Amino acid sequence: MTMTFQHNKMEATQVVAKDNYDQTINADGFYVRYGKRVLDLAIVLASLPIVIPVLLVCALANLLTRNPIFYTQLRLGQHGQIFRIWKLSTMHPNADKLLEDLLANDPERAREWQSTQKLKDDPRITRVGAFLRRTSIDEIPQLFNVLKGDMSLLGPRPMMLDQIELYGPTLDVYLSMKPGISGKWQVSERNDAHFRRRAQIDVEYASDLTLGTDLKLVLETIRTLIRSTGY
């Protein structure tokens, strides 16, 4: 199947081989259409008096260490729409070149990246960035993605465009939902799941998408933030 994604003047065409997929989605339709957005707005607006000062302090920390304040990247969203995600910068300015060289010269890290799309011992990350990632504070700017409507507080992690083929045959399930800042994968197998397993977890979430499920994930997200397990 050929999929063409458009974003303003940019077009990206990806070829995705899809297997037969017969997963029944048992979501709460009314909640998905209306309630989930209300929950997003209520939580984000209530949290702004707290998160804005934290965001300003962390932005200043990046500025004082002469690193970029924000990092932005195009991601794949609901219905194939491409949007720009925002994060606090956690890496050195030449991070892309560092990753390219690292994967070309370190087979073990190349295998880790191919499997999880992450590195546990990532030399691209700054000292401030390590703290921001461990506490997940680097994700705070995505609250504005949620306000804009590109993302939800809870859902599959927003996929990079070059990860489409890695995702597997359940891409249609991913595209049916808004990507989330947190979600079932983020609070369960966050740092250990292979990329295909991450896709399976997204299907599990989509098959039971209700208010009760999301409220439970909100509580589990708070526990995960307290444990500071990110990297």
Image (cartoon, helix red, strand yellow):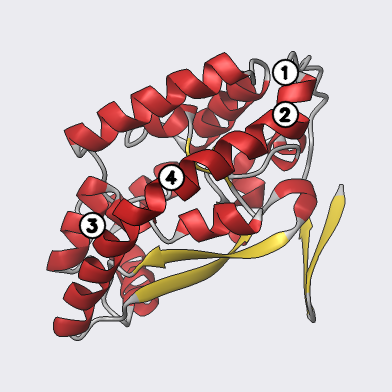
At mark 2, the secondary structure is helix
Q: Position of residue 144 (x, y in %)?
A: 52, 60
At mark 4, the secondary structure is helix
Give the residue type that dot 2 points to: Val
Q: Which residue is mark 1?
A: 27
Mark 3: give few (<14), some (14-19) or many (20+) Cα within 10 Å. many
Name the residue located 70 percent from the left edge and 62 percent from the top edge: 82
Of marks 2 and 1, the one in the foreground: 2
Q: Which residue is mark 3?
A: 132
Of marks 4 and 1, the one in the foreground: 4
Mark seen at residue 32: 2
Give the residue type that dot 1 points to: Ala
Give the residue type that dot 4 points to: Ala
Q: Are marks 4 and 1 in contact (CB under 8 Å)?
A: no
At mark 3, the secondary structure is helix
Name the residue located 43 percent from the left edge and 50 percent from the top edge: 117
Badge 2 or badge 3: first in the primary sequence: 2
Q: Are marks 2 and 1 in contact (CB under 8 Å)?
A: yes
Badge 4 or badge 1: first in the primary sequence: 1
Q: Position of residue 18 (x, y in %)?
A: 79, 36
Name the residue located 19 percent from the left edge and 86 percent from the top edge: 66
Q: CA distance from mark 4 to mark 2?
A: 21 Å
Q: Nearer the viewer, residue 62 or 165?
A: 62
Residue 202, quarter of picture: top right
Does any portion of residue 39 appear in the rendered image? yes
